[in-house]
Image (cartoon, grey):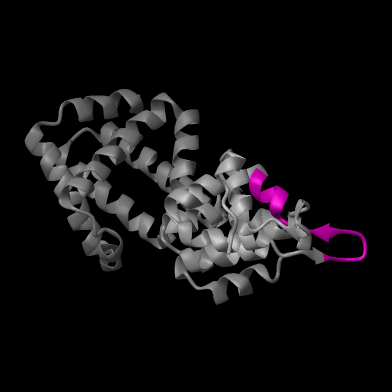
Amino acid sequence: VHEKAIERFIVGLSEESIGFLRREVYKRFFQLAPAGQDHFKQSTTRLHFIADKIIEMTVEMYKQPKRMVEDISALGLRHVGYAIPTELFSPFVSGAVDVVRLLTTDGNAEEAFRWSLTLVSKILVRTILEGSTVVMKAVNTNSDKALRKAISVAPRGRRATDLLNITVGTQSISPLYWSIESGSLNCAKAMIEDLLTIRADRDNYYYGCDALFNRHPEAIHRLCVDAPTLLPALLDGLVWRSRIATGGRALEQAEITMMLLHIPKASIKPLK
């Protein structure tokens, strides 16, 4: 009943009504939660796109609930990186439902929209709460000191996992890659240095090289493209693993880079 009611409502909207819905959703939201304006600084076109996607999700939640849960969980993990306060979701839902109430007299359509958007909101909140680890909170500050403090409480055997993988349900995000994408290069450098630091206890040595390249086999290429300033930190850590001696010395950083990037040996020039 709800699926048919919300489909009738969406299909029956005129261009004028759609434009009103796009504008009024944010107007009501900002009235209910003024702090939300600090998190919606995009262009009007982008805000309208977000409003359209929200309406689309409320319909798709009835049609393909399993796929939508996965998609919304992935969206929630991205919101972890955006540092979105979870208390903003409730007023957004309330504002959107108030606007829909102005556009329809069909009680089923209003209730269908309310139920679906509330469910989307709850999934996002759960994902954000589970994914907001101390490492991700430190990444949002771009402070290497905060990152080192956050990871210092992790056991030696879990440090690499905490820096490379946050999983909620079937979705996962890499704090290292997110710090690179968001421009938090101070934190990214601190992560790389921590991963490639050798630690030990009575029984084991811990060194995050294998964990790094198992999670991100393309890490060298990614840094070359998006964050070349981080390459020295990575290569300094990898020198510990250099077992090849040439003329009585271990390979230098540039030579290791050439090997990792599969550049022909003939093109490697001696370093001064």
Choose between 71 and 238: the one closer to the eye.
238
For image coordinates 48% across by 45% down, the residue present is 123
Choose between 182 and 117: the one closer to the eye.
182
Choose between 207 and 9: the one closer to the eye.
207
Rendered-image quadrant of the C terminus: bottom right
For image coordinates 67% across by 53% down, the residue present is 161
- Residue 244, horizontal then vertical, whole percent: 76, 51
- Residue 64, horizontal then vertical, whole percent: 43, 26
- Residue 3, horizontal then vertical, whole percent: 34, 26
For image coordinates 23% across by 61% down, the residue present is 30
Please tell me whether residue 42 belongs to the stretch shown in magenta: no
Q: What residue occupies the far left of the structure in this picture?
A: 16
Residue 167 visible from this viewpoint:
yes
Residue 164 is left or right of residue 120, and the answer is right
- Residue 52, horizontal then vertical, whole percent: 24, 38
Write the start and end of the magenta stretch as one range.
200-213
The picture quadrant where one finds residue 130 is bottom right
Residue 163 is left or right of residue 229, and the answer is right
In the displayed structure, would residue 251 be above or below residue 59?
Answer: below
The picture quadrant where one finds residue 81 is bottom left
Residue 125 is left or right of residue 166, and the answer is left
Residue 88 is left or right of residue 256, and the answer is left
For image coordinates 10% across by 31% down, the residue present is 14
Choose between 168 and 227: the one closer to the eye.
227
The mark tally for this picture is 0
In the displayed structure, would residue 244 be above or below residue 11?
Answer: below
Residue 172 visible from this viewpoint:
no
Rendered-image quadrant of the N terminus: top left
